[in-house]
Each structure stands twice: as structure tokens, then as C-alpha cells.
Image (spheres, rainbow, N blue to C red):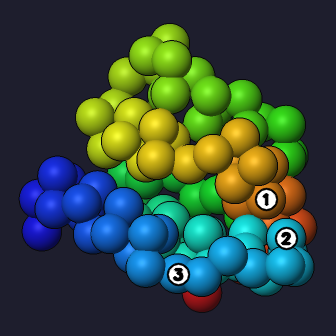
Amino acid sequence: MPASLHATLFIVCLGAWPAFADPAAHGALLAASCSSCHGLHAVNAGIPPLAGLKEAQIEQSLLAYRTGRRSSQIMQVVSTSLTPEEIDEVSRYLAAQRLEPTR
């Protein structure tokens, strides 16, 4: 599936979900779309895993994509579709996940 289609689906899905009162639940919902490329708990060849990264590292990366300091068409679309609060929530959720060893 082309990256632009992934980005479009991501944005459409975000708009379709109701707002959550629980930031952790909302972070999990936001992170679900990340897993289609990154996986949440496993290593995906060629795409870095997100589980186990520090919250600040994830947040800084998303902000760098958003401002164009880091280059990735799909990640720029994803990062600009997130509010600052959603970047906090998804960063916090992903940082709490643990990378599972490959078997």
C-alpha cells in the first residue's frame, strides 16, 4: 500500500474516533496506527521499532518531522495531523511499551 494511502487512512481514522477522557486510552488508540508500519512490540525490517524508546525521544522525533527538520513524507503527514496533546499521549504510551525479543 502506498505511503500516501497509509497517511490518508491514518488521518481519516483519527477524525472518526471520539475524544477520550483517559489520555492513556487515547494514546493507545493513536499508537495503533503506528503499528501498521513500525509494529509495537517487534522489530520490523527497515522501520525502527517504537517500543522502549524514551518518551522525550519519540516526542522530539515527531516534532522534528512536523517542522521538517527530519525528512519523511509519511511521518510529516502523521505528525502534522496530531495535536500537541496527542503527541504527548502517543509518546507516553509508546515509551511505556517494551520491545519483545525476536524469536
Q: Could you tell me which residue is drawn at 24 percent across and 60 percent down?
A: 8
Q: Amino acid at mark 3?
A: Trp
Q: Is residue 52 visible?
A: no
Q: Which mark is nearer the camera, 1 or 3?
A: 3
Mark 3–mark 2 Cα distance, whole angstroms, equals 14 Å
Give the image quarter of residue 62.
top right
Mark 3 neighbour class, 10 Å CA radius: few under 14, some 14 to 19, many 20 or more:
few
Tell me residue 6's x, y (percent). 25, 63
Secondary structure beneath label 2 = helix
The residue positioned 36% from the left and 41% from the top of the image is 77
In this picture, is 51 found above or below 20? above
Looking at this rendering, what residue extends furthest in the top direction? Answer: 69
The residue beneath circle 3 is 17
Place of residue 64 in the rendered image (x, y in percent of width and height, measured from the top left) = 58, 22
- What residue is drawn where x is 76% and y is 49%? 85
Instruction: Look at mark 2 in the image and give the residue it sits on.
Output: 23
Say if 49 sits above or below 24 in the image.
above
Image-based side of 82 in relation to 77, left or right: right
Q: Earlier in the sequence, mark 2 or mark 1?
A: 2
Q: Residues within 10 Å of mark 1 (few under 14, many from 20)?
A: many
Q: Residue 31, image x and y in percent?
A: 61, 69
| Left or right of residue 27: residue 67 | left
State the residue at coordinates (39%, 34%). Answer: 76
Q: What kind of element bears circle 1?
A: helix
Q: Residue at label 1?
A: 89
**The one of 29 and 69 positioned closer to us in this rendering:** 29
Contact check, label 2 and label 1, Cβ < 8 Å? yes
Real-space Cα distance between discs 1 and 3? Answer: 15 Å
